[in-house]
Amino acid sequence: MIKIKGILETLTFQNPDNHYTVARLRVERLLDPITVVGHIGGVSEGETVHLTGRWGSHPKYGDQFNVHSFEIILPATIPGIRKYLGSGIIKGLGRGLADKIVDHFGDSTLAVIENEPGRLREVRGIGNAKQAQIESAWNTHHSVRRVMQFLQQFNISTYHASTILKNYGSDAMSVLEKDPYVIARDIPRHGFQIADTIAIQTGIPEDDPRRLEAYILSWLLQCEDEGHLFSSLDTIEAQCLKILGQEPEAIEQAIEELSLKDEIIVEPFTPADRVYLRHLFQAEKGISDRIHALLSMPEPGLPMEKDQIVELVLSNLAVKLSDEQLDVISQALHQRVVVITGGPGTGKTTLIQAVCAVFRRIDRRILLSAPTGRAARRLAEVTGKKAFTLHKLLGFDPETGYFERNRSNPLDMDVFIVDEASMVDTLLMYHLLQAVPVQSQLILVGDTFQLPSVGPGNVLADIIDSSTVKTFFLTKIFRQARQSPIVMNAHQIRNGEMPDLKAHESNELSDFYFIEKQSPAKVVEAILDLCCDRIRKAFPHIDEIQVLTPMHKGEAGTINLNQRLQEMINPAKGGLESNGMTFKPNDKVMHLKNNYDKEVFNGDIGVVDEVSKAQGKVWVNYDSRLVEYDIPELDELTLAYTISVHKSQGSEYAAVIVALTMNHFPLLQRNLLYTALTRGKSLVIIVGSKKAFETALCNNKTQLRRTGLKHKLEKALHYERETDLRAAGTQGQGT
């Protein structure tokens, strides 16, 4: 590590959420200031800092110093203190008052403000209110410094320090001093290691019960982050023994304590008990209970004969239903909860259109929804009826985590249709079902072979596998779809069959191509050629071509591909930089998290309309609606010339190019390949190695998620049947 000392001349950029900073540092004996980057919280222009880090090079901005840790050097001389306090760094403390304070306390001034702020009232003109104002301003400015420097003494990076500050704000220091193991509850993955480092070095014994409890919670949070709902008790005991060296008796005691505190739920199960975080158990059980509540209601028994349905759909949609589709609709009229699933070309979209037409004819009020903004817009386009994202429909408040729509304030409708239901995780499905009136009908539509939800659980697949809900599997591929190699290859992949990757070599035009390239570098060059020349002529609009890749890192990952494509497609100079990306007019961008104030949602894709460096603003066009971003908000944006396969779920694009190399090995799975292929509407081109394709095809061991919904649904159904049998037996004895 290299150490440098200097004065912060300019703060070019500072993210208030994570304290990521780009600054210019004036170093003695160097003619020009140097660029420093890193998580440097609680600093202001004019302050002297001691930085530890390494030199690096940015391809566009040249040499820069990457900060690993830092220390603010407060002035020790009277002239230095006078200049520091009079600079305006401490709000409410002007030059005149600063001089009075320094005249009174001399070189002890900063120590007095830091440790004995009440003594400021010794200075003439400073009363209780002014003293409190100075103390508050000093603490506000230096609280970040205190936390950063406290953590750095334990060799904890500024990045993790900024994460702690983001979670706890001005309370961070008191949290760390009182019980560092609290961090493990609030920061998944790295929280326990950080807390343990602090605790052990500050004298907390290794057998402290808080340590074991914190590790168990941290492990369960990590499981949730990976999509699981629970961990088996056996696994937890093995992990605690391996990582902490704790014996079973201590682990059992910790589990019991966490249960008594209502932080976890232990569900008896054979061969090993299941340990849940409380909110996940309640959500999973709530889903099961609500589905059975819906199923317990009398069947709707809506009157419409099959020939009436055929005639209605033909006259409204000019579509003749297949026998399979007709059977689904006629049965769906009599079900409280229905699942409709099937692959591409099996008529799911037509079926949704037809269901809407039928329910409208019999005066049933319909609500249409989907998990993402893109999926909701596509649903609205095919049905001609407004569709909503689930979060918006349920009135989600991101600040409080509260859903406005719930059991006491349910949705006002008769039929609720949810498209792309495989993307709905356990927590969202729980809140969705809480808002569904028990006298209504629920129709879940989705393709269970796609990638599971990003959040925990595998809800749609579990509902289907439980056999408690009437499920319709669409299997017939329609004639028009059978003419599409995209559709037919997707079904072959779904069945584990190898498509003919050389079929496109004939002179006939196709909508599916495989271009074999062995190395990631060759894959990237081929993709650049396709996007910037060969297929750009057929698909000239920036929205029509979407490059997909399994991973973010690596030569054929989203980060590198986005930079390379931006350089070729949009080479204009200028723009506004944020987090290593430069946003310029005409750039294709994606919004990364739900922003309800802006009405822009995770996965929405737009085009940069205007950039103002002077104002520090970027305007993005989302479907002819301009949305404004300030510099601190740019971490909600990323370039979207290339996106991950996971981010593409729920969307369709005219042309899709998929990067597939053995460097993507950790994520090469059949359902990922299937999901990528089914995003393309008119053209799919896979660029990569045949070995990577075969590896993905043969890997059908999709990471099994540990979920208990199937078991809970089956158990509730079994209990219901036993109750009915006992009731019938009692009646028989009575007669």
Image: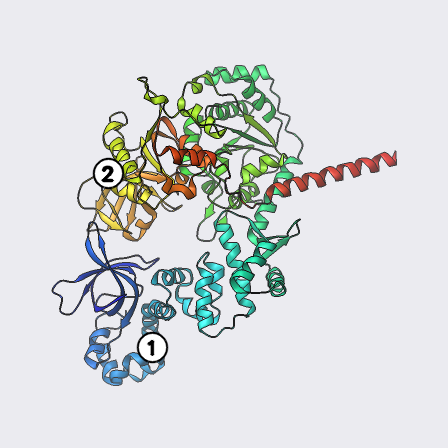
Q: Nearer the viewer, residue 561 or 234?
A: 234
Three-letter code, disc 1: Glu
The residue indicated by pointer 2 is 586
Vertical position of residue 696 compared to residue 614: above or below: above
For the residues labelled 2 and 1, the Cα–Cα distance comes to 50 Å
Where residue 146 sits: x, y (%)? Answer: 35, 70
Residue 608 falls left or right of residue 143: left
The residue indicated by pointer 1 is 114
Rendered-image quadrant of the C terminus: top right
Where residue 689 sits: x, y (%)? Answer: 35, 34
- Closer to us: mark 2 or mark 1? 2
Three-letter code, disc 2: Asn
Q: Quadrant of residue 3?
A: bottom left
Residue located 50% across and 58% down the image:
218
Q: Nearer the viewer, residue 242 or 610?
A: 242
Residue 502 falls left or right of residue 611: right
> In the rendered picture of this protein, how many numbered marks are placed on residues?
2
Vertical position of residue 606 compared to residue 8: above or below: above
The residue sitting at the left extreme is 31
Q: Tell me, what colour scheme is on the image?
A: rainbow
Residue 479 in view of the camera: yes
